[in-house]
Amino acid sequence: MTHPAPRQCPVCSGELHVARLACDACHSGLEGKFSLGRFSKLSREQVAFVEAFLACRGKIKDVEQLLGISYPTVVARLDEVVSAMGFETQESASSPAHAAARKEILEKVATGKLKAAEAAAQIRALRKSGGR
């Protein structure tokens, strides 16, 4: 069983990189500094969203139904993924999608479905993607 590589150093919170690759078949190894690409910048929740988005072939209405979330929330999560991967978003700071996403995050905290620290991280991700 393999686990996803951590993204941050547990000591200093710096960005981690892959330093060794190994072949299971012949046991050869290669050392160096390797990039995991843009997808490695996504959180587990963002990866799960991307998987759902792709499974629905990008049809937002289908993503809404699959995940049980509203259209603005789907758009806000897509913007989070786009931003996390280093692409620019087109959403403005006063976007209704961001406002709806923030409201949903806060409602989850109020009902105990989300921890405050996780909510703070999600709200920071919204801000990075252009929401205030």
Image (spheres, grey):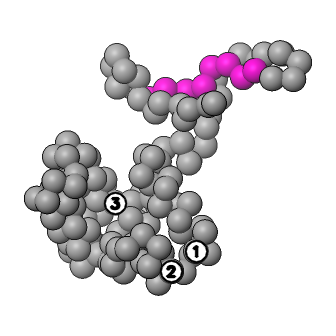
Of tags 2 and 3, the one toward the viewer is 2
Give the residue at x 14% y 59%: 111
Disc 1 residue type (three-letter) = Cys
Q: Secondary structure at mark 2?
A: helix
Give the quarter of the figure containing the C terminus: bottom left
Q: Which residue, given by chain and number where applicable, does mark 1 sit on?
A: 56
**In the image: residue 68, left or right of residue 106:** right
Q: Earlier in the sequence, mark 2 or mark 1?
A: 1
Q: Secondary structure at mark 1?
A: loop
Q: Are marks 2 and 1 in contact (CB under 8 Å)?
A: yes
Magenta-drawn stretch contains 47: no
Q: Which residue, given by chain and number where applicable, does mark 2 sit on?
A: 62
Give the residue at x 29% y 63%: 130
Work out whether residue 42 or residue 27 is closer to the camera in this orientation and state it: 27
Q: Secondary structure at mark 3?
A: loop
Work out whether residue 65 or residue 101 is closer to the camera in this orientation and state it: 65
Give the residue at x 61% y 69%: 55
Q: Which residue, given by chain and number where applicable, does mark 3 sit on?
A: 129
